[in-house]
Every structure is written in structure tokens, then in C-alpha cells.
Amino acid sequence: EEGRPTGTKVTLFDVSDLDAPVDLATWSPGGGHSGAEWDHHAFLWWDGRAVLPFEDWRNDEHGAVVLRVSDSGITEEGRIDHHDAEMIEPVPPCPVVSIVDDGVPVVMICDPGAPTSMRGHWCEPLPREESKWWAEEFGVDPETLPADRDVVVCWPDGGNVRPIQRTLVIGDRLWSYSWQRVQENALDGLERRQVVTLG
């Protein structure tokens, strides 16, 4: 009577009799959750495939699952994710004035309005009226700060992979979007083809 969610579940129903739908097949990984559970825009149906974002807190998985749906059942074709295939060293967009405690955080001096994002980090410009005080906190001599530049502090994001929000098909390619990137995978086989990094 008082249940609780135990994970994502996809079920195929025969609804020829709306008063008595029949459960034909179910796929469930035994945990996790999907944005499609509360936002129908996250769900993609394409040529017998259901694609939905999927996150599993048990194994830190953030991706999308591709399911083949037919009259005989639901089978998992595979999964895609936005993890980097290889570790890419972050490149600071502005001159670095301090790296505190072996890279945590990185303090930069940037021109006003300059891009301040850095791969694998979240960056925050300090308010100018407080930047000299904060600079001291990060081991930077406040007298060395130019008055007409912004102090930006960037903290590593811990390798946090942003969850996939949406998927779509263009031709024979499956495209996926997260706040981190837009990615192309082959629709058959799901091999990663190309990546466009955002931010």
C-alpha cells in the first residue's frame, strides 16, 4: 500500500482493452532513475527503439539506455554516456596567479567579460570590491592585482559527469545532449562518433 520507488522500470502494455491493460514485457535494471519518469520530453521513440536518460547511483552511471521494443519483449541494446574517453588536461583561459593545494583551487586574472570556463572545473568571478580580501585567502598578494581585471577562482568538479538530458535521431546517428556536451553515436552499435564540448 505504501510503496517507494526502487528504480527505473519500462513496461510494455497491451491496451486494446483500456479497462484491463495487460503487462506484456518489462525491463528494469534493479535501481537508478530516469528524467523520463517526470519529463516526457526526455523519452525518445524511434523505429522500435526507446531511448531514455538513465542514472544509477549504485555505480555512478550517468548516460542513456537504448531499448529494443517489439511484440515479443523489451531488450537492452546498449548504453551511451558522456564520460571522456581519455583524460584531457584542463587549459586555463586566463593567466594563472595561484594554484593552491596541488590544483585546488586555480586562481586566474581575467579581462572583464572574457570566457572563464575550464574543463573539469566550475569557475566563479569574485566581486571586485571583495577580490583583494579573497586573493589573500588564496595565497595571492592583493597588491599584485590589477584594478581593471577580474579575479576568477576555479574549483575541480571532481570528475562529475553531467547526466544526458535529451536524445534525438538524425539519419543513422543518435545524438545526445547534456549540460557538458553534444555527442553523436552510431544508432546501430552505439559507437561514439564525435563530441562537441559545451562551455
Image (tube, rainbow, N blue to C red):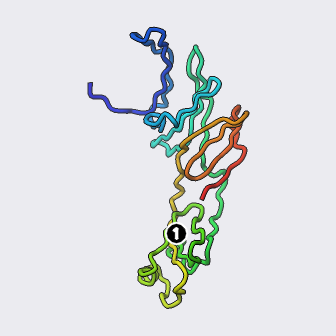
Is the residue marked by circle 1 packed among few (<14), some (14-19), or many (20+) residues within 10 Å?
Answer: many
x, y percent for residue 4: 33, 32
Name the residue located 56 percent from the left edge and 18 percent from the top edge.
73
Name the residue located 40 percent from the left edge and 10 percent from the top edge.
20
x, y percent for residue 51: 58, 32
The image shows residue 20, relative to residue 4, as above or below, that is: above
**Secondary element at image label 1:** strand
82 lies left or right of 2 = right
Furthest-bottom residue in this view: 143
Q: Tell me the quarter of the picture where residue 90 sits.
A: bottom right
The image shows residue 199, relative to residue 170, as above or below, that is: below
Name the residue located 61 percent from the left edge and 51 percent from the top edge.
181
Type of amino acid under label 1:
Cys
x, y percent for residue 155: 50, 67
Q: Which residue is mark 1?
A: 154
Name the residue located 52 percent from the left edge and 36 percent from the top edge.
41
x, y percent for residue 126: 46, 74
Check the picture and name the quadrant holding the N terminus.
top left
